[in-house]
């Protein structure tokens, strides 16, 4: 199958095969990866390898802690303000889509929020342009890739306040100066591994700024102090993520970025050259990870879905809130898959346009 799902998303076949073997017998230990204790040497080694891979792939300086948490993106929408937005304080948010808006809603439980820029009135077709970022904010939160609308930040706010980035649907897809962020979070199920684990990278200096007393499970500082094993972490999800990151290290972030760029360019060119399909995101802000498009004849959309399905394409339906089509081009989506999708689109178009 050619899987273009936006999440949970496709993983490299060799990662799946190795994970499958480990479910039966992990590294010749005679134990399943599902059976090993989370405080034992085997898992401790795995976690340390994972932390080192994250640091290396993102070229992080020594100021950062790497954490593996649960609860997904939604949990981060709450944990960020719970930890870093004190009562009476104001956090800034850039409202670039559904997930960004959800993060804002959740922050309002803990303090004030200020929308620094929003593209809501444009149907989130573009990344909103920001102007002045007050330096009184507790932090500024951005969503660097908008999974549902297919827009992506290619330029980042420069600010004195801590910069928090939801990078769920793009982390490890491109090279960037990751040290410009104070906190990065990414759910695994888009571009890292299976659902069940969320990767957090946080500056040590930020950890010290926890604004209220919190149960350990909700405190970055506590979880960091326990090296992500304050509770039982999702061992299997972390294991699969480490397998994937190991593989990514062999490829190199630069190489994967070039490949991702080429895949996206090829698909956007095909869409722009089509008489039937058109892209919905504004040029210049188009995501390399999630490509959103529609048919000029809406009545043909379900026919195309069926046509694609018959040709082993899955996961191209747009998010339920926007409709149309969306193809995720995460790291594990091969250039061959993209070429196949384009061929299928072109064949359909030839059959359905005069
Ligand atoms: C998928 C996604 C989320 C939500 O993740 P859950 O784990 O389902 O809560 C949050 N932010 C972004 C950018 C996403 O793509």
Image: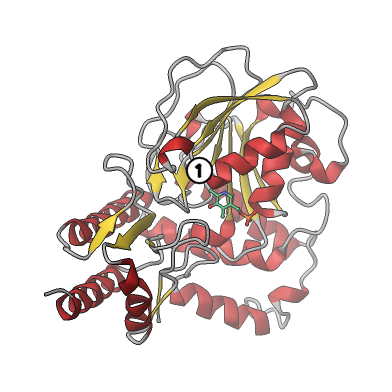
- Residue at the outermost left position: 354
The image shows residue 331 at horizontal and vertical percentages of 40, 60
The image shows residue 186 at horizontal and vertical percentages of 57, 49
The N terminus sits in image quarter: bottom left
Quarter residue 215 falls in: top right
Relative horizontal placement of residue 267, taking residue 303 as reference (left or right)? left
Residue at the spot of label 1: 97
- Seen from the viewer's position, the closer of residues 334 and 233 is 334
Q: Is mark 1 within 8 Å of ligand 1?
A: yes
**Rendered view: 197 above or below 111:** below
Residue drawn 65% across and 24% down?
Answer: 91
Q: Quick one: label 1, few (<14), some, or many (20+) residues within 10 Å?
A: many
- Residue at the outermost bottom position: 310
Relative horizontal placement of residue 23, taking residue 314 as reference (left or right)? right
The image shows residue 57 at horizontal and vertical percentages of 46, 47
Residue drawn 70% across and 34% down?
Answer: 107
């Amino acid at each position: 199958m050619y899987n273009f799902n936006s999440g949970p998303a496709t993983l490299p076949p060799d990662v799946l095969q190795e994970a499958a073997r480990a479910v039966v017998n992990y590294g010749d230990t005679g134990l399943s990866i599902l059976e090993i204790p989370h405080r034992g040497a085997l898992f401790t080694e795995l976690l340390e390898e994972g932390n080192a891979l994250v640091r290396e792939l993102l070229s992080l300086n020594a100021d950062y802690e790497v954490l593996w948490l649960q609860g997904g993106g939604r949990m981060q929408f709450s944990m960020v303000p719970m930890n870093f937005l004190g009562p009476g304080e104001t956090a800034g948010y850039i409202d670039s889509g559904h997930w960004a808006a959800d993060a804002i809603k959740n922050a309002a439980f803990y303090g004030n929020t200020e929308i620094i820029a929003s593209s809501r009135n444009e149907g989130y077709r573009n990344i909103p342009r920001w102007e002045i970022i007050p330096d009184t904010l507790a932090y500024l939160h951005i969503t660097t890739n908008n999974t549902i609308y297919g827009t992506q930040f290619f330029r980042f706010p420069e600010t004195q306040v801590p910069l928090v980035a939801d990078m769920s649907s793009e982390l490890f897809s491109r090279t960037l100066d990751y040290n410009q962020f104070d906190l990065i979070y990414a759910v695994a199920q888009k571009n890292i591994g299976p659902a069940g684990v969320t990767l957090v990278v946080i500056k040590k200096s930020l950890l010290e700024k926890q604004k209220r007393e919190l149960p350990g499970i909700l405190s970055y500082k506590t979880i960091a102090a326990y090296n992500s094993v304050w509770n039982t972490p999702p061992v299997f999800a972390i294991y699969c993520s480490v397998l994937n990151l190991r593989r990514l290290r062999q490829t190199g972030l630069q190489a994967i970025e070039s490949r991702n760029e080429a895949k996206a360019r090829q698909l956007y060119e095909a869409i722009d050259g089509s008489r039937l399909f058109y892209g919905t995101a504004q040029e210049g802000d188009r995501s390399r990870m999630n490509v959103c498009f529609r048919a000029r004849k809406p009545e043909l959309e379900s026919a195309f879905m069926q046509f694609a399905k018959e040709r082993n394409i899955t996961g191209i339906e747009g998010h339920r809130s926007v409709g149309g089509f969306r193809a995720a081009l995460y790291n594990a989506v091969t250039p061959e898959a993209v070429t196949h999708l384009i061929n299928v689109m072109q064949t359909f178009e030839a059959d359905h346009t005069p």
